[in-house]
Image (spheres, helix red, strand yellow):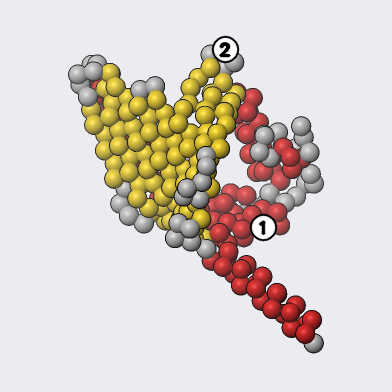
Amino acid sequence: MNKLKWLLIVFMIFLILFILIIVTKLKVIVDFYHGQDNDDLKIEFKAWFGLIRYKIHVPLVKLDAESKSIISKEKTSIGPDAKQDKKTNKFTSKDLFNSLHDTKVLLHHVIGFHKIIRKFLHKVKLKNLEWETEIGVGDAAYTGMLIGAIWGIKGSIIGIFSNYMRLMDMPKLSVQPNFQKAISQTRFQCMFQFRIGQAMFAAIKLVKYWKGGKPNFKSKSLSPLSNNN
């Protein structure tokens, strides 16, 4: 009887933890800055009022003409005062084609892939979206034309966001022309929020509606699922 009692207690503990994980809200905070030749990307994951944190910081992105690749230095940390892990990543044209290939494989193998992803994104809340840009090419006429084009691009991107996700507040957009000098500077900030359970159910649906046997993934992140080197 005591053994059954302990088994019941353990089962209840695991059930409570599982429910907590499902209802936990995950915040993904994105902060991207581009200024001339400097690029800086920060992505922070938060849960349980900031008690659980995971940060990704990519302070340097540059083009390597010799290898025709994009090189970035990435820093990651878990927790508010955790030590940062540093590594250098290289993204080549082959990696791009492999990612496009994997996307095609998913679309082919998962029945209703777009519908599953769209349904999940409709549950994602988008907050605190700010997008500031300062641009100039040294010529007033061309700068004015570029300003109009940038406003159009921003409007289209915000339209896509609002169509697929739940826009919780009005985005703060600005485009500042600089007619005196050539300059390219932009900052993009926003926060995505969703429940972990919603992402889990979307992943389960992807597996449930899988067809066509074993996939042939080629990208670094997905190739282990195909046992590819």
Quarter of the image with the C terminus in it: top right
Residue at figure coordinates x 57%, y 28% from the top left: 88
Residue at figure coordinates x 30%, y 51% from the top left: 170
Among the 4 quarters of the image, the one containing residue 187 = top left
Mark 1 or mark 2, which is nearer the start of the sequence? 2
> Helix, strand or loop at disc 1?
helix
Residue 164 seen in the current view: no
Q: Position of residue 184 (x, y in %)?
A: 32, 24
Q: Position of residue 205 (x, y in %)?
A: 66, 57
Q: Which mark is residue 204?
A: 1
Residue at figure coordinates x 48%, y 26% from the top left: 61
Hey, what amino acid is under mark 2? Glu
Q: Nearer the viewer, mark 2 or mark 1?
A: 2
Describe residue 71's horizontal placement relative to residue 37 as left or right.
right
Quarter of the image with the N terminus in it: bottom right
Q: Is residue 172 above or below residue 176?
A: below
Residue 65 seen in the current view: yes
Q: Which mark is residue 66?
A: 2
Residue placed most toward the observer, 205 or 107:
205
Farthest-out residue, bottom: 1
